[in-house]
Image: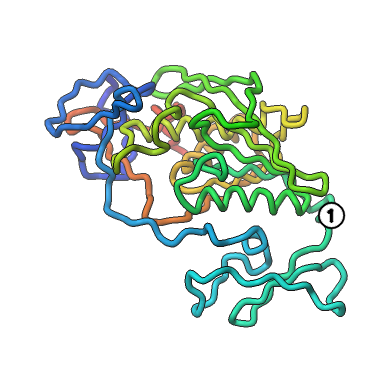
Amino acid sequence: GKSASRGRLNLVPLRHNTLRLYGGAAEPTIPNIDPVPVEQSPASGGIRLVRPMGGFQRTSSYSSLNDIMLTGDKAGKVGSDEGNDAPPVLQAAPSSQKSGTKLTMKRSMSSEIIIPDSLLPESERLNIVIVSSEITPYSKSGGLADVASKLSAALARLGHRVMTVAPLYKNYEGIEPTGVKRTFGLWDSGHTVEYCHGFQDVGGGKGVDHVFVKHGCFERAGMYGEGGMDYGDNLFRFALFAWAALEAPLVVPCGGVPYGEDIVFLANDWQAGFVPLILSSHYRRYKVYSKARCIFDIHNMGYQGPFPNPPLSEAPPFSFCDFGLKDNAYYD
C-alpha cells in the first residue's frame, strides 16, 4: 500500500464505507476491510457496485434543443416565462436584414437569435475538442449526449474543425480502430487505450471527427453503473478517460492530420473534470498546449462525482500522484 503521509485531496472530508475506488482494471492491493456488504455485477464480470453518494434527481433534459439554440448569440439565455415547452420556431430573416444572416429564432420575450449564413472567416475558425462521457447516437443516458452531438455538428457547420471524444462502451457501426495506442500511468501501473474513429458529414464539405477511447474498463453492461448502483472504479475509469482525451488531438490522425496543440477543449460534467487539471498540471509544464484553452461545462449540478478520501475507513488516502500527477499537482 501507499504511505499514509501522502497529500490528501480533501474534497470529501468524511470517511465513507460504501464507495470504493477499486474494481476491475483499477484494483489495487487494498484489503477488503469494509464491513458493509457491496454488490457485484454478474453482467460485467463481477465488478463491484456501490451506492451513489447523494440523492439528487436528474433535471430537465436538453433533448428538445436544436443546434440553432445551442450556438446562437442568445444560446442558454432562456426567459422566465419559458418552461419545458417545445423550442421556438425558426423563421427566415426579413429581406431587409443585413447580409451575412439567414435564419432568426424568436422567443416569447421578443429576443432574437441570428445565425450566420456563411462560414466564419478563416481567422475566427478554431480547433474544438468536445470531451463527453456520452454522445448521441452512440451512447446516451440524458441530455448531455444530445448536447455533445448537436453542438459538435453546429460548430462544424460554422467552419470550426471539431472533434468529440467519448468512451467506447461497445462496438459502434461506422467506428473503426485507428491503430493508435497510448499508455497512461495511474495507481503505479500502466493502462493502454486504443483510439477508434468515425466521421460524421454535416454538409457543406464539413464534418465532425468522433473519437472513441477503447479500454476494458468501459466495456460493461452500463455506462456508469447498473441497477441504481455505481461502478466502484468510476474514479479510475474517468481519470483514464481524461488523460486519453487530452492526448487524442496530438496523436489521432483525423483525415490524415492530427489536430495539434492549438485547441479549445470543452469538458463536460464531472466525468471530464480531470481535463483542465491534467492540462495545466502536466502538459503545460512540458510546454505542450501552451496556447490551448479549456471550458468546463456543468450540465446538471445533481451529478457532482464526489468520491471519499480515503476510500476505506482504514486505507491510506489517495492523492493526485495516483492519477499520474507525480508532485500531487501541488502548484495548481
**Figure check: 309 above or below 98:** above
Give how far across and how far down residue 308 sits, in percent: 27, 40
**Figure check: 63 above or below 240:** below
Q: Judge by depth and name the residue closer to the eye, 151 or 252.
A: 151
Residue 131, image quadrant: top right
* Residue drawn at point x = 57 percent, y = 43 percent: 137
* Residue drawn at point x = 28 percent, y = 44 percent: 52
* Residue drawn at point x = 42 percent, y = 29 percent: 323
Give how far across and how far down residue 230 sits, in percent: 32, 38
Q: Is residue 287 visible?
A: no
Give how far across and how far down residue 313 sits, in percent: 17, 33
The type of colouring in the image is rainbow
Q: Is residue 103 visible?
A: yes
**Figure check: 310 above or below 127:** above
Q: Judge by depth and name the residue closer to the eye, 97 or 308.
A: 97
Give how far across and how far down residue 151 sits, in percent: 63, 53
> Across the whole image, how many numbered discs are drawn on residues?
1
For label 1, the SS is loop
Q: Residues within 10 Å of mark 1 (few under 14, many from 20)?
A: few
The residue labelled by disc 1 is 121
Q: Is residue 318 left or right of residue 288?
A: left
